[in-house]
Amino acid sequence: MAFKTKKLLKKAVSWAGLFFFVVAAYMLYHQLSQYSLEDIKNAVFAIPSRNLWLACAASFFGYVALSSYDYLALKYVGRKLAPWKWIFAGVIGFSVSNNAGHAIVSGGTIRYRLYTRWRFRATEIIRMVTFSGFTYLVACFFLIIVGYLLTPNHAFGGGSVSKLTTQIVALVSVVGLLIYFGASLFYKKAIIIKGVAFDVPTFKMALAQVIIGAADILLASLVLYYALDSFVHIPFDEFMGVFIIAQVLGVFSQVPGGLGVFEGLFMFIIPGQHNQAMLFGALIAYRVIYYLLPLLVSGVALVIYESYLKYVRKQSLEKLKIFNAEKLRETTKL
């Protein structure tokens, strides 16, 4: 591939990150536009302020946990980076992919734009993004198993087909997790795909992937739990089972943010009789706190960072011009 073509391709991928940021913002707008501002305001302010603060804290730490995917990926490729950088890349990447869907593409292009500026090679970024994808996959396997064990029986439907399907999905998750752990213990050869070598993670790292994925879903669930706590009284273990099943199926539906799929499943699965308006209001508040606010903060942070880089580049060019002018004067004198 010619040098100019490679350069053009790199620029296209880099700018695609900003494109997916716009897509994420549009998808979130589309998700919330079906409700009036009054509906959203009422849903949020119906929740006690203490619960709102707790939900916001859970969302903040949830995105920090999500950024740990990047920390593990850095360890996987054997690179070090200042903590603020991998947290910055992780939070922005996930705030985009959570809303735009197709995490490897949307979040991956954001990471490509940032990590190339921090002197990472394209092959390293590909390995990092792929590793993060597997982190989410094995975490899903683990969470499906946990969700299956915790979710009330009626959630799986009364028919034998639905129960059998659920059992098969849970069994596939068990087998997938065992295969992954087995490979981490016994398979030591690198897997080469299109010239890029992927090492199988160590068992310790595979275990860390599951733990980080579980921490991510636990903190995300707390955002909704605190929003619901005043209206719905449900044991936390039952709530977790419902949340996990709805969240995982929402992700695998490939609908951006699991819109509609997550809400519909959650309201169907949750045990007991509840005020549907209050329940749906809490789900709107969850969307605002876990999806809208992180995207807004990430958007502001990205604009500030891009502006700062532009300012630094401009200053560097000015200094270079001054240096060259002085050097030219000295040469002329001689």
Image: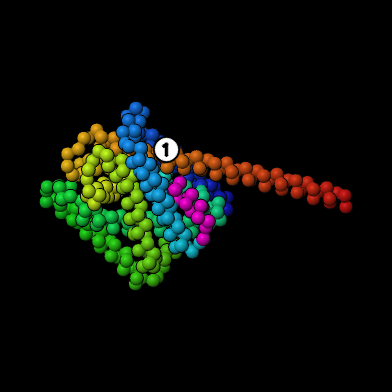
- Give the residues drawn in magenta, as a range: 80-93
- Rendered position, 21 above or below 86: above
158 is within the stretch colored magenta: no
- The residue closer to the viewer here, 74 or 301, is 301
87 is within the stretch colored magenta: yes
From the top left corner, tell me how far across and down residue 225 is, in percent. Answer: 29, 44
User: What residue lies at 53% left-to-right and 47% top-to-bottom?
Assistant: 11
Q: How is the image coloured?
A: rainbow
Q: Which residue is mark 1?
A: 25
From the top left corner, tell me how far across and down residue 328 is, in percent. Answer: 81, 48
Q: Residues within 10 Å of mark 1 (few under 14, many from 20)?
A: many
The answer to which quarter of the image holds residue 315 is: top right
User: What residue lies at 42% left-to-right and 45% top-to-bottom?
Assistant: 95
- The residue closer to the viewer here, 318 or 44, is 44
User: What residue lies at 46% left-to-right and 41% top-to-bottom?
Assistant: 297
Confirm whether residue 99 shows in the render: no
Amino acid identity at mark 1: Ala
